[in-house]
Image (cartoon, helix red, strand yellow):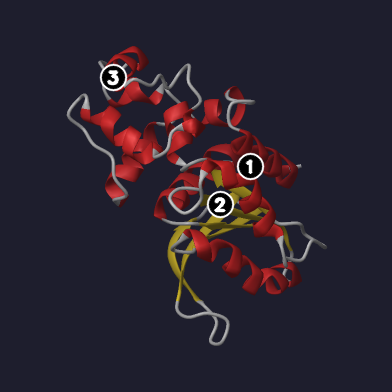
Amino acid sequence: MKKLAIFVEGQTERVFIERLLAEIIGRRHLRIESYVAEGGGRAGGRALNLINVIDPDHKVRFFAMIVDCGSDGRVRSDIGERYDSLVAVGFSTIIGIRDVYPDIAYQDIAKLRTGLQLGLKQLPVKVLFVLGVMEIESWFLSEFSHFTRLHPRLTTEVISKTLGFHPEKDDMQLRTHPASDLNDAYHIVGRGYDKSKQKIQRTVNILDYAELYLGMKGRLPDLDALNASLDQFLS
């Protein structure tokens, strides 16, 4: 059985990754265990509390552990703390996913990428860090077909005329606060978006995962890197 560990910043990333993995790998062969990391730091270690399991009906071929680290800054440290134990029990792929906003400016993203790797072991498994630039909601904005599934009147042209940016034509990674943009777009048709589980799940449920996995290559380099890593994991 192949094993994958993904450490994420928070609930939004966890819910999205659960659905992405289930859509790509299929529920029949994939077991997903999601945890929340809690507690102190290196002295006492961080406890992992199981919060969700997606279990296949048939023989498991792939296992994914998703860890909600609770904040941007915890992603790297939680990976570092558990790297040796993960490798020891056969995890072949380790990924960290975090946003850039609000702590890092766009022009400092390259420094962030370098800093995330400093001090981490590179062998036998090199950790892949995936950034939501500036937030993972830029991916949701870029999957623009989901807007009309939320409401038929919420076209990209309506969003462009009302808010001044065009999810289909513009680079959503250049938006300073994509989660706020998503909320503003949804408000056009009397809906809203925030970090509550209910609203995250609503958006995650109407995204087109075939488009995110195959149709958007070249638009979101970090999503491309994530998909390439998942392809390698599945090979």
* Apparent side of residue 214 relative to residue 156 in the rendered image (left or right): right
Q: Please name whichever residue, 55 or 184, is drawn nearer the observer in this view of the structure.
A: 184
- Which residue is at 60% across, 41% downward? 25
Tally the numbered discs.
3
Amino acid type at circle 2 is Ile
Q: Please tell me the numbered disc located at residue 154.
A: 3
* Residue bearing the label numbered 2: 97
Percent coordinates x, y for residue 4 in the rendering: 65, 56
Contact flag, marks 1 and 3 (Cβ < 8 Å): no
Q: In this view, does 219 lie above or below 224?
A: above
- Which residue is at 48% across, 65% downward? 35
Q: Please tell me the numbered disc located at residue 206.
A: none
Q: How crowded is mark 3: few (under 14 residues within 10 Å), some or many (20 or more)?
A: many
Q: How crowded is mark 2: few (under 14 residues within 10 Å), some or many (20 or more)?
A: many
Q: Earlier in the sequence, mark 1 or mark 3?
A: 3
Q: Which of marks 2 and 1 is nearer the N terminus?
A: 2
Contact flag, marks 2 and 1 (Cβ < 8 Å): yes
Q: What is the quadrant of the C terminus in the image? A: top right
Mark 2: which secondary structure? strand
> Would you say residue 131 is visible in this rendering?
yes
> How far apart are the alpha carbons under marks 1 and 3?
29 Å
Percent coordinates x, y for residue 80 in the rendering: 65, 69
Q: How crowded is mark 1: few (under 14 residues within 10 Å), some or many (20 or more)?
A: some
> How far apart are the alpha carbons under marks 2 and 1?
9 Å
> How far apart are the alpha carbons under marks 3 and 2?
29 Å
Mark 1: which secondary structure? helix
Q: Please tell me the numbered disc located at residue 226.
A: 1
Mark 3: which secondary structure? loop
